[in-house]
Image (tube, rainbow, N blue to C red):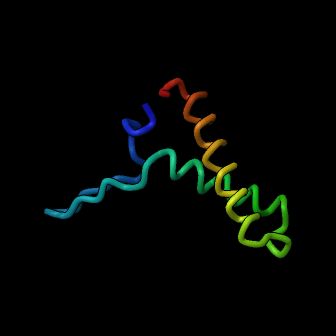
């Protein structure tokens, strides 16, 4: 299940702990850069950014499935 995935970049220092971002969010962020670059950020408007965001999470979900954890 996607909500049970490990996190990316968790850390602990003394009594401070950060769980990090979800692996899904990390994958989506990495995919988003490539998607925006491919479309040209100057050519995107609000609906274009929404479409890119949706595609990034779809790609992230496919990457998670490819890892065999979803």
Q: How many marks?
A: 0
Q: Which residue appears at 84% of the width and 67% of the height?
A: 40
Q: Which residue appears at 68% of the width and 61% of the height?
A: 50
Q: Is residue 65 left or right of residue 40?
A: left
69 w.r.t. 42: above or below: above
Q: Position of residue 14 (x, y in %)?
A: 16, 63
Q: Is residue 44 left or right of residue 65?
A: right
Q: Which residue appears at 69% of the width and 49% of the height?
A: 55
Taking depth in this image into account, of 21 and 14 the one nearest to the observer is 21
Q: Position of residue 33 (x, y in %)?
A: 70, 60
Q: Residue furthest top?
A: 68
Q: Position of residue 17 (x, y in %)?
A: 23, 59
39 w.r.t. 41: above or below: above
Q: Position of residue 60 (x, y in %)?
A: 60, 43
Looking at the rendered image, the quarter that the N terminus falls into is top left
21 w.r.t. 14: above or below: above
Q: Residue furthest bottom?
A: 42
Q: Which residue appears at 14% of the width and 62% of the height?
A: 15
Q: Residue furthest left?
A: 15
4 w.r.t. 19: above or below: above
Q: Residue furthest front?
A: 47
């Amino acid at each position: 299940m996607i909500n049970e995935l490990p996190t990316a970049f968790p850390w602990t220092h003394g009594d401070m702990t950060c769980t990090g971002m979800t692996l899904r969010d990390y994958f989506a962020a990495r995919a988003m850069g490539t998607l925006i670059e491919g479309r040209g950020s100057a050519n995107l408007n609000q609906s274009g950014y929404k479409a890119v965001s949706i595609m990034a999470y779809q790609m992230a979900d496919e990457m998670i499935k490819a890892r065999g954890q979803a």
